[in-house]
Every structure is written in C-alpha cells, then in structure tokens.
Amino acid sequence: MSIQQEITWLFLLSIPIACVAWTVTHEEVFREPREYCIKKSLNGKSILVRKFFYLFTCEYCFSHYITIIFICLTNFHLLMDDWRGYIIAGFALVWIANTYMSLFGLIRQDISKEKAEIREIITNLADDSKKKT
C-alpha cells in the first residue's frame, strides 16, 4: 500500500472508531449500561474491576479497544509491514479518532449553546408581549 493510501485509510478508518467510541460513551441509547459501568467503576471491589468498567465510560480509553478491533478486522498497518506498523497505526488511529470526537463535542456544545440562547430570546419575547397586553 502506498503512503497516500495509508494516510487515506488512517483518516477514514478513524471515523467509525470515533463514532463507536462516542456513541457508547455519550449517547442516550447506551445510557443504562453506561450508568451501570459508572457505578461499578466507582464501587468495584478490586482495582481491576473498577478499571475494566471505567473503560466503557471514557471515550479516550474506549477508543483504544475499538481501534484494536478495527485493526484486527482490516489488517491496517502504518509505515511498516511488521508488528511495529500495527502499533504505529493503533496510536495514530486513536489520535485522529479522538481529534474527531473533540471537534464533534465542540460542535455539539456550540449547538446546545445556540439553542439555549434562542429559547431565552423566545421566552423574553413572550414575556414582553404579555406585558403589552
């Protein structure tokens, strides 16, 4: 595979890694299992149990495990054809995926802020119209 193809794979393969990691650690569809994992990560009897359940609550931690799965599924390696290429690919994929998740988080935060500002404007307009009548 050429370096251009490897770079393309790097940026494209990071998208589903980021998607899976974000969905499991943030979205409503996984809220109940995530809440269970949070409880276990805080109240587990051993450090191994606490750390195991914590990885399902942290997008950065979870993205490492998702990356390993995707590397196994795709046999993707970066720069070198041996085991070192898999390690380099793993860390590169995690870094790009977490960059994507950070950007997505900032965009969602900005959208939430704008929605709150719009609600406040609408509330103020409704209050003003009530005062006039």
Image: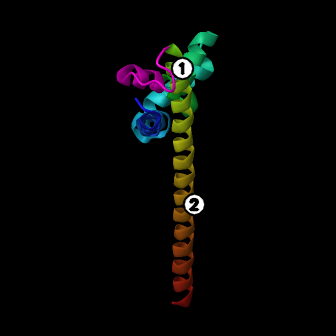
Task: Please name whichever residue, 130 or 51, is drawn nearer the observer in this view of the structure.
Answer: 51
Could you say which quadrant of the image residue 49 lies in? top right
**Image location (x, y in percent) of residue 126:** 51, 79
Q: Residue furthest front?
A: 2
> Can the viewer see residue 58?
no
Magenta span contains residue 80: yes
Q: How many marks overall?
A: 2
Q: Residue at x 56, y 83 (%)?
A: 128
Which mark is on residue 14?
none
Task: Please name whichever residue, 133 or 94, is drawn nearer the observer in this view of the structure.
Answer: 94
Give the CA separation, mark 2 to mark 1. 39 Å
> Can the viewer see residue 114?
yes
Q: Residue at x 51, y 29 (%)?
A: 63
Cβ–Cβ below 8 Å for labels 2 and 1? no
**Regarding mark 1 in the picture, which secondary structure is present there?**
helix
Q: Nearer the viewer, mark 2 or mark 1?
A: 1
Q: Badge 1: few (under 14), some or many (20 or more) residues near its Cα, within 10 Å?
A: some
**Image location (x, y in percent) of residue 67:** 47, 26
Task: Please name whichever residue, 104 or 82, is drawn nearer the observer in this view of the structure.
Answer: 82
Q: Residue at x 56, y 27 (%)?
A: 91
Amino acid type assigned to the residue bearing label 1 in the image: Ile
Q: Residue under circle 2?
A: 113
Region in magenta:
66-82
> Which circle's residue, 2 or 1, is located before the other in the chain?
1
Which mark is on residue 87?
1
Q: Residue at x 51, y 31 (%)?
A: 93
Magenta span contains residue 65: no
Amino acid type assigned to the residue bearing label 2 in the image: Lys
Residue 61, relative to residue 29: is it above or below?
above
